[in-house]
Amino acid sequence: MTGGRVTVVVITHNRRAELLRTLDRLAALPEAPSVIVTDNASTDGTAAAVARRHPRVRLLRPGRNLGAVGRNLAVRYVATPYVAFCDDDTWWAPGSLARAAGLLDRHPRLASVTARILVEPGGTEDPIVEELRDSPLTGPSWLPGPALGSVLAAATCLRADAFREVGGFSARLWLGGEEELFAADLAARGWWLAYVPDLTIHHQPSPARDATLRRVHGIRNTLWFSWLRRPLPAALRRTAHLARTVPRDRASLRAFGQAAAGLPWVLRERRVVPPAVEARLRLLEGAQRRSRARRYVG
């Protein structure tokens, strides 16, 4: 199937049951991919359970919660040309990894392919799929699907060398909307990202999640990304839009406070994307504001 070209990377934290379900599904794939799990300091017996039930899985235990950077750690051990990410509550459908590898084989400037997401147990499309399918971006004619301005780390197969070229996910952002900065850096280096509806990933959302913390990080990281990579007018515009539209509560205030506290390092590390990439980001703003999947709630 994939001929040893794809490694699946999963990060997890205190979701033993969900992770074991995901690993069971990955073990049953006809592609038989290698799997690496970064256990972000779970305290629920995750590591021992994985070692017992899936001894062939490479298990990394950094000893602390690295957030998205747990993926960076895992990619250090990836020997295949492609790496497919999924979360501990998502899993790839049979055949999708083989198709993803084939597309990346055929298109050397394609950095990533993002899959259609079906929400389980009902198998309905995730609301984000509409935004991916109707992306306003145009790209070269060889793209296997709509051009994207970002990726979804729970549902994307990437070229490992492209991932390493931009340094993976930012340790500053930790987790929550970390893909936007990563994707902009890929685009700035001339890589293309695509949505491919023939690829499928299943998502059965875990009840073990802190929705409020996720919102805090999402708002904070959106602000940081805007000031790290967007020209001044765009950064001001996005900041003003968030200030008008996020819930007026302590969580939002906390997010803006954290974003403001990070301004010294943000300004030191600020590197505006090339005009062509900024033009794509501007095209995406309208779709993002209308999206049913982008709501700061919790």
Image (tube, grey):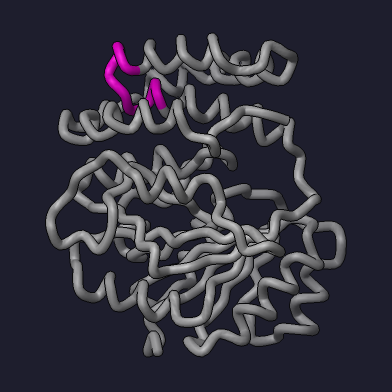
Q: Quadrant of the N terminus?
A: bottom left
Q: Main secondary structure of the magenta part?
A: helix
- In this view, 34 is above or below 222: below
Q: Position of residue 149 (x, y in %)?
A: 33, 42
Q: Position of residue 117 (x, y in %)?
A: 52, 59
Q: Position of residue 138 (x, y in %)?
A: 19, 44
Q: Determine which quarter of the picture holds residue 266.
A: top left
Asked if residue 119 is among those painted magenta in the image, a careful observer would answer: no
Q: Position of residue 59 (x, y in %)?
A: 66, 73
- In this view, 274 is above or below 230: below
- In the image shown, does 195 or 12 lie closer to the viewer? 195
- In this view, 248 is above or below 83: above
Residue at x 42% of width, y 43% of height = 131
Residue at x 41% of width, y 65% of height = 157
Q: Determine which quarter of the picture holds residue 277.
A: top left
Q: Which residue range is magenta in the image?
A: 226-234
- In the image shown, does 39 or 180 lie closer to the viewer? 180
Residue at x 45% of width, y 72% of height = 78
- In the image shown, does 3 or 148 lie closer to the viewer? 148
**Relative to 243, 20 lies left or right:** right
- In this view, 164 is above or below 98: above
Asked if residue 233 is among those painted magenta in the image, a careful observer would answer: yes
| View extreme (right): residue | 44
Is residue 88 something that shows in the picture?
no
**Relative to 131, 52 lies left or right:** right
- In the image shown, does 136 or 33 lie closer to the viewer? 136
